[in-house]
């Protein structure tokens, strides 16, 4: 974005210089145009105003991050992740949240393996195995995600980035035994649940995939 801003600024300077020279040198004799000399003070004033406008437009077109010096806390860390786009990352997290809840409830290990880290996947498998042996089935209905926000971000010395995302959602969760009797939950009761899920990625890798490595409830 800095290079883009510089190009725009240079273009503005070129146009202003041309306009000033044109006003000083005048136009062709056949044109009936009044020649107006632009003073240095006027030129500098216009140049300053144009620079401020270009910088303002640049910031409006890229609201996610400004310069690293102006960023604080989590956003400063996120700025150190190559090709990171905060809005796109949050959209993907929302989709993964929905997919993992559904896959876990339906014992879809293939989907869970694709979306999660090895250790978390093994935990999911263990719970699924236990439920299967006990004849317990789960039903999860995600009504909506009320809020999604990035709460923390870290980059290790090995280049492993971890981002903690908080989800506030409305869900209906039910556990049933083999006879179909409800063991836990109520199909008429909507719970508001706050989860914090952590996603991980090697920033030195060309892969765009962020794997879910941790889940906990607040």
Image (spheres, rainbow, N blue to C red):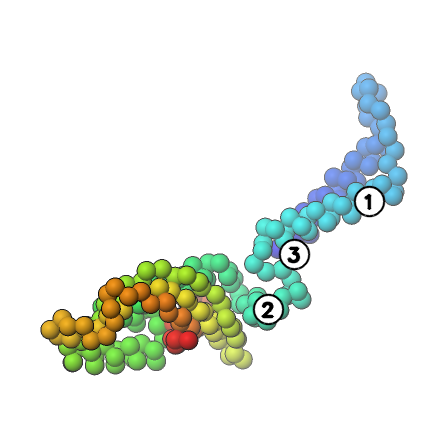
The residue most toward the front is 188
**In the displayed structure image, the side of residue 212 where residue 62 appears, left or right:** right
Q: State the mark number for residue 129.
A: none
Q: Observer-nearest residue: 31 or 135?
A: 135
Q: Earlier in the sequence, mark 3 or mark 1?
A: 3
| Corner quadrant of residue 49 | top right
Q: Quadrant of the N terminus?
A: bottom right
Q: Is residue 198 above or below residue 42?
A: below
Residue ID for mark 1: 45
Q: Disc 1 and disc 2: Cα gap in Å?
A: 34 Å
Q: Residue at x 58, y 54 (%)?
A: 62
**In the displayed structure image, the side of residue 69 where residue 26 appears, left or right:** right
- Mark 1 lies on a secondary structure that is helix
| Circles 3 and 1: CB atoms closer than 8 Å | no
**Residue 202 can be seen in this image:** no
Query: Could you say where residue 31 lies in the image, as x and y percent from the top left?
Result: 80, 20
Residue ID for mark 3: 2
Q: Is residue 79 above or below residue 42?
A: below
Q: Residue at x 25, y 79 (%)?
A: 127
Q: Given this view, does label 3 or label 1 mark the residue nearer the observer?
A: 1
Q: State the mark number for residue 76.
A: 2
**In the displayed structure image, the side of residue 61 where residue 54 appears, left or right:** right
Query: Could you say where residue 47 lies in the image, as x and y percent from the top left?
Result: 78, 45
Q: Residue at x 61, y 51 (%)?
A: 60
């Amino acid at each position: 974005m800095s290079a883009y801003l510089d190009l725009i600024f240079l273009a503005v300077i070129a146009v202003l210089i041309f306009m000033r020279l044109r006003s000083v040198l005048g136009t062709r004799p056949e044109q009936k145009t009044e020649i107006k000399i632009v003073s240095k003070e006027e030129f500098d004033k216009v140049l300053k105003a144009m620079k401020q406008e270009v910088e303002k437009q640049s910031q409006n077109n890229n609201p996610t991050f400004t310069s690293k010096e102006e960023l604080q806390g989590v956003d400063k860390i996120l700025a150190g992740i190559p090709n990171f786009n905060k809005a796109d990352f949050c959209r993907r997290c929302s989709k993964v949240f929905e997919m993992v809840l559904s896959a876990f409830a339906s014992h879809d290990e293939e989907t869970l393996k694709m979306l999660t880290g090895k250790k978390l996947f093994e935990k999911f498998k263990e719970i699924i195995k236990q439920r299967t042996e006990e004849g317990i089935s789960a039903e999860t209905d995600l009504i909506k995600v009320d809020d999604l926000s990035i709460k923390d971000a870290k980059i290790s010395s090995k280049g492993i980035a971890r981002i903690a995302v908080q989800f506030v959602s409305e869900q209906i969760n039910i556990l049933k035994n083999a006879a179909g009797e409800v063991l836990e939950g109520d199909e008429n009761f909507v719970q508001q649940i706050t989860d914090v899920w952590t996603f991980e990625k090697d920033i030195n890798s060309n892969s765009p995939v962020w794997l879910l490595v941790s889940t906990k409830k607040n």
